[in-house]
Image (cartoon, rainbow, N blue to C red):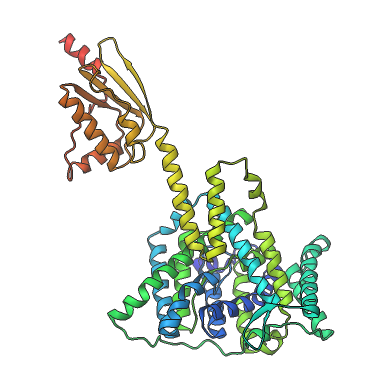
Amino acid sequence: MKAVLHLFDFRQKVNYRSEILSGFTVALALIPEAVAFSLIAGLPPLIGLYAAFVMGLVTAVLGGRPGMISGATGAVAVVIASLVHTHGQEYIFATVILAGIIQMLAGIFRLGKFIRLVPQSVMYGFVNGLAIVIFMAQLAHFKTTDANGVTHWLEGKSMLTMVGLVLLTMAVIWGLPKLTRAVPASLAAILLVSAIAIGMGIDTRTVGDIASIHGSFPPFHLPEVPFSWNTLQVIFPYALVVAGVGLIESLLTLNIIDEITESRGHGNKECVAQGIANVTSGFFFGMGGCAMIGQSLINISSGARARLSGIFAAVMLLVFIMFGASLIERLPIAALAGVMVMVSIGTFEWASLRSFGKMPLHDVLVMVVVAGVTVLLHNLALAVLIGVIIAALVFAWENAKRIRARKYTDEHGVKHYEIFGPLFFGSVAAFNEKFDVQNDPVEVVIDFRESRVADMSGIEALNRITERYQKAGKKIHLRHLSADCRQLLKNAEQIIDVNIMEDPAYRVATDMIAEADGK
């Protein structure tokens, strides 16, 4: 019973009014997004709407971040579009199910912790790029397609009407919180602008102009694909990418919501929930998806902090599909576009612009590259991966330059090299340059008190330097190797000849000489 209470957050204080109103706002904002992503993937609109309902409900109940919203997303739509074109929608359902299984395994094996490897510069680039993508996506609402299939900008009265309604929506969202927070500003803006447009009979584009959203409860459906090795070969690459994109986007969104709410979500729990949601989506005519940062920010900014808002949003979305389609289809696109423009403005990390000229150049470069890849390719996972790789390479280069050696010869004529900095693939060349084998005395000590051997390249570097000293007829001692370094050396002996004699008692050569003299 305690587990159930914890699952639904009944033990914590919940502002039911804020949760319900926030959920209602999110449900309205989900509709055009889900329809648009379905069309991007080449699928019927209801498949995106069903995915938004299933993903939203399952992750709201089981997810690791209360208040976060999941649904059909553009990142997933872009990945599966070519599969739809070549094999049809049935393969999409099988792909989503397999992707969900991969995500569940990632959560079970606690791989969600690897999101910690994403540096702040990548986070800024991701958020800023996503804000630009959200804004640019709204520009499509200011265009129309003529009878010849040519897309062009709205003109004259149509453009003025669209711009006016969008600006009115934005003004309400900006100004209402200064007067009262009793009602979420986004919801109030949608209702006010819709009432004006419908009540005054203003001729403007509506949700129904995109596609009909009328449908039934999502039916249970087994993917009609051959259960064979060939099918697995077709869907597995797509499933792997969908799983990766979904987890990266979801975990990054979770981190962003954590920062806003000053609380902590559970990454591995979210991985499992995303997996269960995608598997369920595949069996219920959905295209799958992941966390949606835009809708999550709408939800959080409207005051939601618990699971109830996500559950209510999913349920209301289903109600709209089954019973309220005719009413929802009359909502002006301008109102929803205005909400998303304000989301993009709020999403952008304006403080990151102040880092130019003040933060390290490589951090600024990573931020710009990640944002650029996000905007140009609309592939959030690839953008984050590129950013992490660049940041890792820069980190390796900077650490490679930090290895140094303090050298001195004691009263017994023993040469000491005190190594500072990590010995790894990047610092091997600099490490080798520190030693003067030919001119060193017959006994040498290499002290690793302030260093450690990090990888196989470091082991091989130690192996070669000891070989050089032995060929020169000189004796070498290693001192203060850490326990993990000693284990690394021991493991390496199984695959290469480790030509290293370690001083197990960590005594300097002078102590050994003194003991010999005493005897």
State the image coordinates of residue 102 (x, y, percent, origin top left).
Answer: 39, 69
* Quadrant housing residue 357: top right
Residue 463 seen in the figure: yes
Residue at horizontal 80 percent and vertical 81 percent from the top:
197
Q: Is residue 349 left or right of residue 414?
A: right
State the image coordinates of residue 458 (x, y, percent, origin top left).
Answer: 29, 38
State the image coordinates of residue 138 (x, y, percent, origin top left).
Answer: 67, 71
Which residue is more in the foreground, 193 or 385? 385
Q: Is residue 35 left or right of residue 381?
A: right
Q: Is residue 144 left or right of residue 272?
A: right
Q: Quadrant of the C terminus?
A: top left
Which residue is more in the foreground, 375 or 111? 375
Q: Is residue 197 above or below residue 302?
A: below
Residue at horizontal 82 percent and vertical 60 percent from the top:
178
Residue 120 seen in the figure: no
Residue at horizontal 33 percent and vertical 80 percent from the top:
231
* Quadrant housing residue 214: bottom right
State the image coordinates of residue 379 (x, y, percent, origin top left).
Answer: 51, 65
